[in-house]
Amino acid sequence: MQDNAAASSNLVDYVTSCTLPTPWAQFTLHAFVEHATGKEHLAMTLGDLSTGEPPLMRIHSECLTGDVMFSQRCDCGAQLEGALKKIAAEGRGILLYLRQEGRGIGLVNKIRAYRLQEAGADTVEANLQLGFHADARNYELVRPMLQHFGIEAVRLMTNNPRKIDALTRLGFDVAERVPLLVNRNAFNNGYLNTKQAKLGHMMTPAAEPVLDGEL
Ligand SMILES: Nc1nc2c(ncn2[C@@H]2O[C@H](COP(=O)(O)OP(=O)(O)OP(=O)(O)O)[C@@H](O)[C@H]2O)c(=O)[nH]1
Ligand SMILES: [Zn+2]
């Protein structure tokens, strides 16, 4: 049963929402269900998003190991926390939590990829050895999810140029890219270097005041 029938699209249904208190702000958590897969995608919002002013926005790809299990192999958990803190500091913004675990290959395959990395492959080579693309993500769902909130332009928190391209191709105005450089450590240094060298991630230091733990 859907609380907001007007929000349906051919890709995703909006289902319902609740308040979500966090250490940094009281967000609203919104649930969407993808038609093709039944996957449950989420949006966390704060403040009035319908003013026309581009809000801070993050498209966060699920990383159970990083977001939940504190893994230091990647920067995902720290990026999730950093993005929510930035939104809280402005009092306004939106984080989409997309269920694209392992850059779209799923959790079990990501663990297979980690094992190959322990045998010497980098993050891209491991995906290719498993028969996947380096990055199997698709951002189509972002369009109906942002349309649901009446958002046409965003200030995107990312280091990934593919996300900027994807949003632009979907018809959104990326008014600004906000770097999200957090938690470089001995375990993820090589991974972050590979993202920069092979996936084009922009690992330049932030020009703005840094958050706790930000590089
Ligand atoms: N296949 C695979 N996926 C990974 C690996 N490490 C992290 N991930 C997944 O990568 C996704 C995050 O993508 P990243 O490339 O780290 O960053 P991004 O989201 O593209 O870019 P940012 O917006 O700058 O964070 C999550 O879904 C993680 O589960 C890995 O070694 N192999
Ligand atoms: Zn991760």
Image: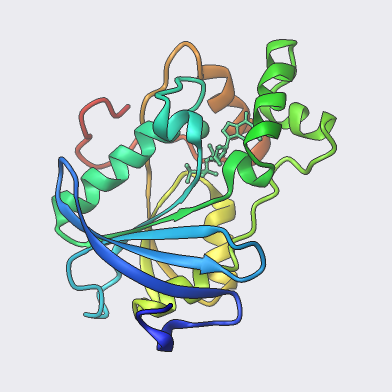
Find residue 9 and report its horizontal and vertical position in percent: 54, 82
Who is closer to the viewer here, 130 or 93?
130
Asked if residue 150 lies left or right of residue 21, the reply is right
Give the residue furthest to the front: 1
Asked if residue 30 lies left or right of residue 123, the reply is left
**From this viewpoint, is residue 120 visible?**
yes
The residue sitting at 68% across, 12% down in the picture is 118
Above or below 181: residue 155: below
The residue sitting at 61% across, 38% down in the picture is 102
Query: Looking at the image, what colour scheme do you see?
Result: rainbow
Location of the N terminus by quadrant is bottom left
Find residue 143 and report its horizontal and vertical position in percent: 51, 73
Which quadrant of the view contains residue 210? Answer: top left
Find residue 122 and report its horizontal and vertical position in percent: 70, 22
Which quadrant of the view contains residue 127? Answer: top right
Give the residue furthest to the bottom: 6
Above or below 89: residue 169: below
Asked if residue 30 lies left or right of residue 136, the reply is left
**From this viewpoint, is residue 172 visible?**
no
Above or below 72: residue 4: below
Find residue 124 and report its horizontal and vertical position in percent: 72, 32
Quadrant in which ligand 1 is drawn: top right
